[in-house]
Image (tube, rainbow, N blue to C red):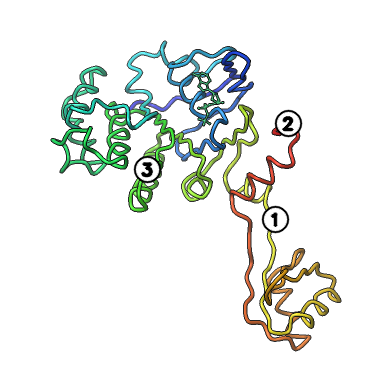
């Protein structure tokens, strides 16, 4: 692995006719952490990744690797490895033949092929034709293809699509391991729940524009709110006591639950005990990444 250069988008723009798919995006992706490129379908993620890889030409700005467009970098396969579309394999080639062809094209040593086959868990399937693979196995082959050149930067477009729960856990662990080795790991997803479990840092896009570029925990803390849920057989008594204590408490439309904002579980427990109200359940709830994203896109005019 070579020293890892930084991946950078500088006021990157891509227009397709009248559609602006990528709209003045600027961000940098650093080594040693897993960076999630998050946005709904159509947000411009794939287009941006393709520009990093030199597969699409920017209408404006630049996408660079260590300050240069990838095409101007010597031995690009050893610098950046990418999986864009896992289905893009020759159906009649075996997994090993496919990887050997990639290794030849990138002038990478041949024994790397068996290493990456083992790394992605396709060792036993090495002699099977890629056309017969499940989507999950194709994803693994795509990831192996990206890693053949032992690149310092890996870019995966929707790597979790088509994977079963075990495969998702595996891919998440692999991305973490690659980052822990000091590589730059950028992966896109529209699956916010998965992103929440996988990424350390987030670059969030919506309609081609940058909405956020910050650690995942900061993003959630800034764009979500915490509240407390309580369940009790004496709901009216609890509501009265909480409101007297100055807490904002609202009953569920149906059922015995109460939602409290502006206080902690300690506060609610103390108020309930003082009022002699029995609590059946007391939980601190924080909104998910999905909630954060929806709040953000709903409140930002420029994202609408
Ligand atoms: P994402 O990866 O976030 O789902 P894309 O980058 O694939 O988003 O697409 C962004 C927008 O650009 C979409 O509206 C898509 O339809 C459009 N688009 C992507 N590629 C092309 C193309 N080759 N020609 C025309 N429009 C395109």
Q: Which residue is mark 1?
A: 225
Q: Secondary structure at mark 3?
A: loop
Mark 3–mark 2 CB contact (< 8 Å): no
Which quadrant would residue 4 be assigned to in this image? top left
Name of the residue lying farthest toward the front: 254
Does 167 sit left or right of 201 as displayed? left
**Nearest the eye: 128 or 51:** 128
- Asked if marks 1 and 2 touch (Cβ < 8 Å), the reply is no
Work out how far the residue at label 3 is from the one at label 2, CA to CA, in angstroms.
Answer: 33 Å
Q: Earlier in the sequence, mark 1 or mark 2?
A: 1
Q: Nearer the viewer, mark 1 or mark 3?
A: 3
Q: Secondary structure at mark 1?
A: loop
List the residue tagged with mark 3: 162
Q: Nearer the viewer, residue 183 or 115?
A: 115
Q: Residue at 48% of width from left, 35% of height from top?
A: 188
Q: Secondary structure at mark 2?
A: helix
Establish if 192 lies above or below 13: below
Could you tell me residue 85's position as x and y percent? 37, 29
Q: Residues within 10 Å of mark 1 (few under 14, many from 20)?
A: some
Figure quadrant of the C terminus:
top right
**From this viewpoint, which residue is outermost toward the left?**
127
Is the N terminus in the top left, top right, bottom left or bottom right quadrant? top left
Q: Disc 2 marks which residue?
A: 302
Q: Determine the residue positioned at 27% across, 29% down.
A: 148
Rendered location of residue 97, percent (x, y): 16, 27
């Amino acid at each position: 692995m070579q020293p890892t250069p930084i991946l950078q988008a500088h006021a990157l723009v891509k227009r397709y006719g009248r559609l602006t798919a990528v709209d003045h995006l600027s961000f940098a992706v650093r080594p040693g952490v897993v960076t999630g490129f998050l946005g709904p379908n159509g947000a411009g993620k794939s287009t941006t990744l393709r520009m990093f890889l030199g597969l699409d030409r920017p209408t404006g700005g630049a996408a660079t690797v260590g300050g240069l467009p990838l095409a101007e970098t010597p031995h690009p396969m050893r610098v950046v490895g990418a999986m864009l579309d896992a289905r893009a394999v020759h159906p009649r080639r075996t997994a090993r033949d496919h990887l050997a062809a990639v290794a030849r094209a990138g002038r990478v040593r041949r024994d790397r092929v068996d290493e990456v086959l083992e790394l992605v868990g396709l060792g036993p399937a090495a002699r099977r034709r890629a056309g017969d693979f499940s989507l999950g196995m194709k994803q693994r082959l795509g990831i192996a293809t990206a890693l053949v050149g032992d690149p310092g930067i890996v870019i995966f477009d929707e790597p979790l699509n088509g994977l079963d729960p075990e495969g998702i856990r595996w891919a998440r662990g692999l991305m973490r391991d690659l980052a822990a080795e000091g590589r730059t790991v950028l992966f896109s997803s529209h699956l916010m729940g998965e992103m929440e479990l996988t990424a350390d840092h987030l670059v969030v896009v919506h309609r081609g524009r940058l909405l956020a570029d910050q650690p995942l925990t900061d993003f959630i803390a800034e764009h979500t709110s915490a509240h407390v849920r309580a369940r009790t057989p004496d709901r009216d008594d609890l509501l009265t006591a909480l409101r007297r204590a100055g807490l904002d408490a609202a009953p569920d439309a149906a059922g015995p639950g109460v939602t409290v904002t502006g206080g902690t579980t300690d506060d609610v427990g103390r108020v309930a005990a003082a009022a002699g109200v029995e609590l059946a359940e007391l939980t601190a709830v924080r909104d998910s990444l999905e909630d954060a994203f929806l709040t953000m896109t709903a409140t930002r005019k420029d994202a609408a």
